[in-house]
Image: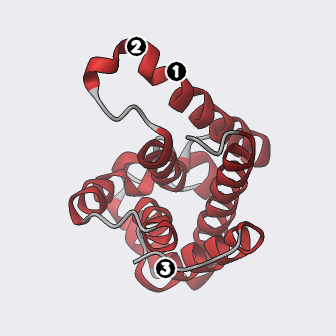
Amino acid sequence: MAQEISKGSLKEQARKKAHDYELQFHGCSQSVLLTFQELLGLEDEMTFKAAGPLCAGLGMGKTCGALTGGMMVLGMKYGRPRIDEGIEGLFSGLLIAQSLVRKFEQEYGTTACSEISKLDWTDLDAVIQAVNNPEFIAICAKVVGRTAEMVAEIIAEVDSQHPHL
């Protein structure tokens, strides 16, 4: 169930909630997604489950899972609701999603999890060592929290400029 929160506090609540989920439970994409599912009333178990394999950069250090989780949030909020809307129906959601990618790239210089985390996610021994290192987890939690903050900034901006979306 969505919490009653002001637009001004959405950013801080999203950052903290996503950060804490990552720190406690791990799973960057699900941490960002669940944060907004709860804060905006977008709960959906199947969507949450679908975000699982996006963690750790598609499980291989590719596109950051926090970013893909954020993209899912923006898609759930602003995406094309029906396939029969055609390509035109995709445009507004794509433009909004592009703003998240731009913000993320500006902040981190890349969208690649392996470059941000400095970890080869295909090396199981290295992954086990990293996820058992509180310093490593703290870095991921910070990225997750900041990404949720970016999503909240975009939502506030879009909703203030286009309240009908």
- Tell me the number on the disc at residue 21: 3
What percent of the width, then of the height, locates residue 56? 43, 56
- Amino acid type, callout 1: Phe
Direction front: furthest residue = 164
Q: Contact, CB < 8 Å: mark 1 with mark 2?
A: yes
12 above or below 107? below
What percent of the width, then of the height, locates residue 99? 68, 36
- Residue 113 seen in the current view: yes
- Amino acid type, callout 2: Ile
C-alpha span from label 3 to label 2: 35 Å
Q: Residue drawn at (72%, 66%), measured in percent from left and top?
A: 7
Q: Quadrant of the N terminus?
A: bottom left
| Secondary structure type for disc 3 | helix
Query: Dot 2: within a 10 Å radius of its alpha carbon, few (fewer than 14), some, or many (20 or more) residues?
Result: few
Label whose residue precedes the other's in the sequence (3 or 2): 3
C-alpha span from label 1 to label 2: 7 Å
Q: Is residue 3 left or right of residue 55?
A: right
| Secondary structure type for disc 2 | helix
Q: Residue drawn at (58%, 41%), measured in percent from left and top?
A: 164
Q: Quadrant of the C terminus?
A: top right
C-alpha span from label 3 to label 1: 32 Å
- Tell me the number on the disc at residue 104: none
Q: Residue drawn at (46%, 41%), measured in percent from left and top?
A: 62
Name the residue carrying label 2.
87
Name the residue carrying label 1.
91
